[in-house]
Amino acid sequence: MAEIDTGGGGGKKKGPKKQSTKVDMTPMVDLAFLLITFFMLTTTFNKPQVMEVNMPDKNNEDKTQKLNEKRAMTVILGKDNNVYYYQGVNNPEVKKTNYSDEGLRKLLLDKKKEVRQVTGKDIFVVIKATEGSNYKNVVDVLDEMSITSIPIYALADITPADLDLLKKNNLE
């Protein structure tokens, strides 16, 4: 049994002798454990956040669409948290940026505005990851797509032509 002795001790005082009082702490400990148990059982834990990725229908593989080259932008995720990008398909000029607000986010916003002014339609971003990139890089780029409200983007496998393009520009 837990108790606290609050009695005075040892001085020489004249007068009536005081009795020592003892406080039993057992009910307090029981109450504390009941409260802890109650709050543990009634709390809600954080739900895992899920990022929605829509995949194309495998039954409609034969359907293709023509895409204006000015609307297409490719983002390549490289090793050491580097981001490379180019616009168009024919003779693209590969440039390098980073994941910061002034890097990838500003680039996406500027390109989105530029494509909208030139074509009147939304930009189409193709995201390709190299062997040196990691899962966090892909999630960061998908977050940027959401933040910048890019409505049309796709995850694709990197091609040997893309890797050759990076090597040709001494970027990877």
Image (cartoon, rainbow, N blue to C red):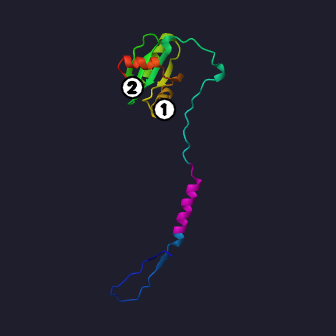
**Residue labelled with disc 2:** 103
Residue drawn where x is 60% and y is 14% of the image: 64
Identity of the amino acid at label 2? Answer: Gly
Residue drawn where x is 48% and y is 30% of the image: 138
Residue 41 on the magenta segment: yes
Quadrant of res 59: top right
Identity of the amino acid at label 1? Answer: Val
Q: Which mark is residue 139?
A: 1
- Earlier-in-chain disc, 2 versus 1: 2
107 displayed left or right of 119:
left
Residue sitting nearer the eye, 152 or 131: 131
Residue 35 visible, this orientation? yes
Q: Is residue 43 above or below residue 143?
A: below
Q: Position of residue 106 (x, y in %)?
A: 41, 23
Helix, strand or loop at mark 2: helix
Task: Please report the bounds of the magenta region as a residue range.
Answer: 29-44
Residue drawn where x is 54% and y is 64% of the image: 33
Q: Residues within 10 Å of mark 1 (few under 14, many from 20)?
A: few
78 displayed left or right of 145:
left
